[in-house]
Image (cartoon, helix red, strand yellow):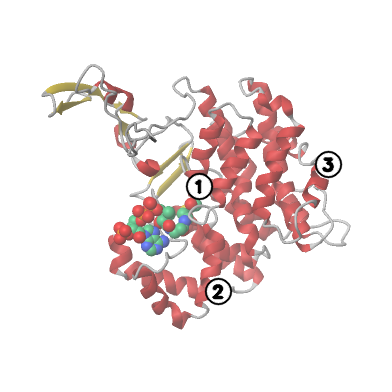
Amino acid sequence: MADSLTITDNRTGETYELPIQYGTYPEYGAAIRCGELRNIKVSEDDFGLMAYDPGFTNTASCKSSITHIDGERGILRYRGYPIEELAEDFSFLDVAYLILNGELPDQSASETWESEITNHSMIHEKIKKFMEGFKYDAHPMGMLVSTVAALSTFYPESRNVEDPDVRALQIRRLVAKIPTIAAYAYRSNVGFPYSYPDNDLSYTGNFLSMMFKMTERRYRPDPALEKALDVLFILHADHEQNCGTNAMRSVGSSHADPYVSIAAAAAALYGPLHGGANEQVLRMLNEIGHVDRVPEYVKRVKAGEFRLMGFGHRVYKNYDPRATILKGMAQEVFELTGRNPQLDIALALEKIALEDEYFVSRKLYPNVDFYSGIIYQSMGFPVEMFPVLFAIPRTIGWLTQWQEMLEDGDQRIARPRQIYTGEDQRSPS
Ligand code: ACO
């Protein structure tokens, strides 16, 4: 079997042979280079054929060795390790190290990495002042997006994106500072004084402290909730070429610095069709209000009035493996926090949807956002913080993807083509 594609252009009768490229294994993806299509022309001065793919539903924008998803089989792996095993046995920071470096850290590397991150968790006092400028009810995701972009002005050397040492420093700064900005955004909203990082706590323990510390001298996170948040962070750390990551790579491809690139990625994540969906799920469950009203709600979804938030995925045409883990984790968290009544509505909704022909035929299953919001809410996070809680762990994924893009000799500035459908040249007279 030849690894190529033969195309006959029926306009000209010409035949073209296009080589087929593979990932690690043929079943992990096969592709032709779209650039090859440009040779397919009807005449010498013809522009050549393009590939038309709105929403990039079938376009591989890069080669990547970070995350593997098999949407049909519900598989998610970081650097080859199944998400279930990572969530069970490792800390978020160790998984972040794995995503960035390709291998899990040994104990010494793990300790060094943790202390490097911890050393950068403070933010400049002027950033704190900057954040005080937001309106009292500013959405924390808007605050995060703007503040992380503002960090760019504090670290002008970050523009030197081609220097690996400069990149390494910005990566550590960003992974460390995003939780601090996130927690400050929350405290600003509720009117509490900002709580400085506590470097003796774990990454997630410190985040909980910055969020919820009140007058106590030392905040001690509940170990079970700290672990639950750590697992949530692991599940959200990377997800290959989603809308936010695509924004990160696209903006970063112009060699913009990583702070403004992360701001762009976080802005993409904020949308209700992406990471903003977890917030929308909770609003939807509130609107439904009672298990008895679920069938009526599903009927309206099927009538096309609105979408069932937390359902469906561009890649998963099976149960999202992250949702499976979260569904189990919800029960564990509720043993500590008390059962969230929204869970009963969510379970009823899921049951009806999974049996209904509309959802079955479209392969619509719960995605990661379906259960994460209920868990966050039970842990005491307000709904507005949900997309922010997504952005914190996704930062390492964005940065690793950005670095991979910069080191990939195939990559150039992201600049798609269009099929022009407007007027031909004309004159106003
Ligand atoms: N509720 C009802 N119908 C849906 C839903 C949904 N949640 N999702 C898709 N559909 C239907 C569409 O109406 C369409 O039906 P049709 O063929 O009759 O027109 C069909 O399923 C295919 O939908 P598309 O929009 O083409 O699927 P796409 O891959 O473009 O969209 C997306 C994926 C955006 C996630 C979509 O499923 C959706 O809007 N879901 C709700 C929002 C959500 O939960 N987003 C979080 C995704 S996970 C994440 O980003 C972390």
Q: Which dot, 3 or 1, sits closer to the camera? A: 3
Disc 3 to disc 1, C-alpha distance? 41 Å
Dot 1: element:
helix
Above/below status of 118 relative to 371: above
Location of residue 353 by image quarter: bottom left
Q: Position of residue 85 (x, y in %)?
A: 50, 47
The residue that label 2 is drawn on is 286
**Label 3 is placed on what type of residue?**
Lys
Which residue is under mark 3? 126
Q: Seen in the image, is 241 located left or right of residue 267?
A: left
- What is the spatial separation of the Cα atoms under label 1 and label 2, in whole angstroms? 33 Å
Marks 2, 3: nearer the viewer: 3
Instruction: Point out the tag, 1 or 2, that comes first from the N-terminus.
Output: 1
Q: Earlier in the sequence, mark 3 or mark 1?
A: 1
Near mark 3 (Cα within 10 A), the count class, few <14, some 14-19 or many ≥20, is few
- The answer to whether residue 107 is left or right of residue 21 is right
Where disc 2 sits, the SS reads: helix
Query: Which quadrant holds the N terminus?
Result: top left
Task: Looking at this view, name the residue that lies furthest to the bottom.
Answer: 292
Q: Quadrant of the C terminus?
A: top left
Classify 265 as above or below 288: above
Residue identified by numbered label 1? 85
CB under 8 Å between callouts 1 and 2? no
